[in-house]
Amino acid sequence: MDEKVRTAPSVRIGDLISPAEAMHLAIREGYRGVGYVSPNPLVGCVIVDREHRLLASGYHARIGGDHAEVDALKKLTDSKSLLVLMSM
């Protein structure tokens, strides 16, 4: 693959992102839960629209807290035509 994947810090809400960039961001979001969610798995979530514009991201921050999907949905301001990508 010759596709250049931008790293999470360079991706912002509203940016058009590729599926690979969305997955990379979901994985990075999931890692934010290291040390706080064990024995549960690390989970990140990225929400994009039909054009693959980044709408929100989230992660499972602590045991008993919101799951990654709920965290991302709470940050969502535009709910039109969603595609949700998760990592585990």
Image (spheres, helix red, strand yellow):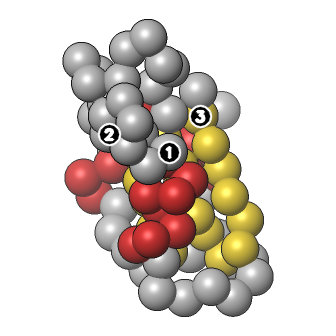
Residue 67 - label:
1
User: Disc 1 on helix, strand or loop?
Assistant: loop
Which of the two labelled residues, at mark 3 and mark 1, occupies the earlier sequence position?
1
Foreground pick, 3 / 20: 20
Furthest toward the front, the residue is: 64
Pinpoint residue 44: horizontal percent, then vertical percent.
48, 41
Which mark lies nearer to you, 3 or 1? Answer: 1
Which three-letter amino acid code belongs to the residue tagged 3?
Ser
Which of the two labelled residues, at mark 2 and mark 1, occupies the earlier sequence position?
2
Which mark lies nearer to you, 3 or 2? Answer: 2
Q: Is residue 40 left or right of residue 49?
A: left
Which of the two labelled residues, at mark 3 and mark 2, occupies the earlier sequence position?
2
Specify the quadrant of the image occupied by residue 63: top left
Query: At 52% across and 58% down in the image, what residue appears?
Result: 70
Q: Are marks 3 and 1 in contact (CB under 8 Å)?
A: no
For residue 28, say whether it is visible.
no
CA–CA distance in space, label 3 to label 2: 14 Å
Residue 14 - label:
none
Residue position for label 2: 61
Q: Is residue 19 left or right of residue 55?
A: right
Which three-letter amino acid code belongs to the residue tagged 2?
Ala
Image quadrant occupied by the C terminus: top right
Query: At 72% across and 65% down in the image, what residue appears?
Result: 83
Residue position for label 3: 87
Image quadrant occupied by the N terminus: top right
Q: Is residue 88 above or below residue 76?
A: above
Specify the quadrant of the image occupied by residue 42: top left
Q: Is residue 83 left or right of residue 56?
A: right
User: Disc 3 on helix, strand or loop?
Assistant: strand
Q: Is residue 8 above or below residue 51?
A: above
For residue 58, say whether it is visible.
yes
